[in-house]
Image (cartoon, rainbow, N blue to C red):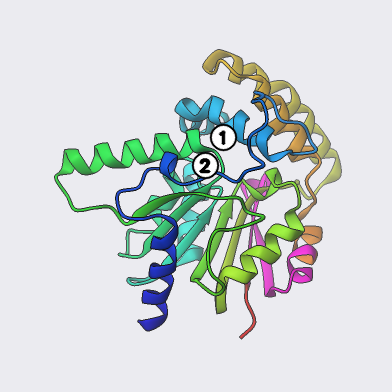
Amino acid sequence: MHANSHALRELRAISPPGATPAQVPRPAYVTLDPMTRAQLDKRPADVAAMFDAVAERYDLLNDVLSLGQDRHWRSVVARLVAARPGDTVLDIAAGTGTSSRAFTASGARCVACDFSQGMLRVGASRASASRAGAGGPAGLVSFVVGDALTLPFADAAVGVVTISFGLRNVADPDAALAEMLRVTRPGGRLVICEFSHLPARPLDLAYQRYLAAALPAVARRLSSDSAAYDYLAESISSWPAQEELATRIRGAGWSAVRWRNLTFGVVAVHVARRPR
């Protein structure tokens, strides 16, 4: 209980009660002229601007493009996070906080952290509207602007760190994995959900060709920024396969690394622990 209280004090120092994402300072280097399509060098400003541009329809597009599978993937992640009352979960690259809310069902608190202010504003607005409609107390999800490479939290501040479909967008995934280790308490857990590769190489190549053609085509019908989904297809194709990612997680200092494929390997969930 004392450890959780310490973690919450540290987190409130970053995101005071009632704060909106716009009130939390953005890292100084995320100030370049906005672009709507990030490149594979993944400059933070470009990636953040790209997600800002699609924030309003992001969840709808995910649902359509995944044929509803994103709901199943989120439910698997929530079960693996296994948050308990009193726990504090750090959800990195949380976007609008759709996944974050699932972690609070047990009474745990969740900090939704993202470097896209546009995504966080949409999430915070929806959370406020939901609370107002229900007439309920303040929510268990806090929205905080932050970069996975320089997380604005104290050492060993949280018991669980999770990131879904975001590690692929970080300029230096290995440094981000080390940074996640820093903010996790000894014995704490890591849960990563990310697009991956089908085990059979011919099927995987066919799938990559499908992504390159289908994602932008569908996005053009539903979004004003279909170029963002060209980047999505490219970033999935260049992302390491399951075993290589597991090796990199171990290399960052995590232990007990394992993974499971979802939807035939379209997505993989990796879990690990910080050594005690």
Q: Among all residues in the image, which is located at the extreme bottom?
A: 276
Dot 2 alpha-carbon crowd within 10 angstroms: few under 14, some 14 to 19, many 20 or more: some
Given the image, on which type of amino acid does mark 1 rest? Ser
Residue ID for mark 1: 66
Is 217 one of the magenta-colored residues?
no
Name the residue located 79 percent from the left edge and 40 percent from the top edge.
Answer: 204
In this rendering, does residue 64 appear at all?
no
Residue 122 in the image: state x and y as whole percent: 41, 34
> What kind of element bears circle 1?
loop
Residue 30 in the image: state x and y as whole percent: 64, 39
Could you tell whether 228 is left or right of 128 in the image? right
Residue 130 or residue 15, whichever sits in front: 15
Given the image, on which type of amino acid does mark 2 rest? Asp
Name the residue located 32 percent from the left edge and 59 percent from the top edge.
Answer: 105
Mark count: 2
In what quadrant of the picture does the C terminus appear?
bottom right
Residue 54 in the image: state x and y as whole percent: 54, 26
Residue 196 or residue 127, whichever sits in front: 127
| Contact check, label 2 and label 1, Cβ < 8 Å | yes
Q: Among all residues in the image, which is located at the extreme right?
A: 202
Residue ID for mark 2: 70
Name the residue located 62 percent from the left edge and 64 percent from the top edge.
Answer: 180
Above or below, comparing residue 233 to residue 196 in the picture: above
Dot 1 alpha-carbon crowd within 10 angstroms: few under 14, some 14 to 19, many 20 or more: few
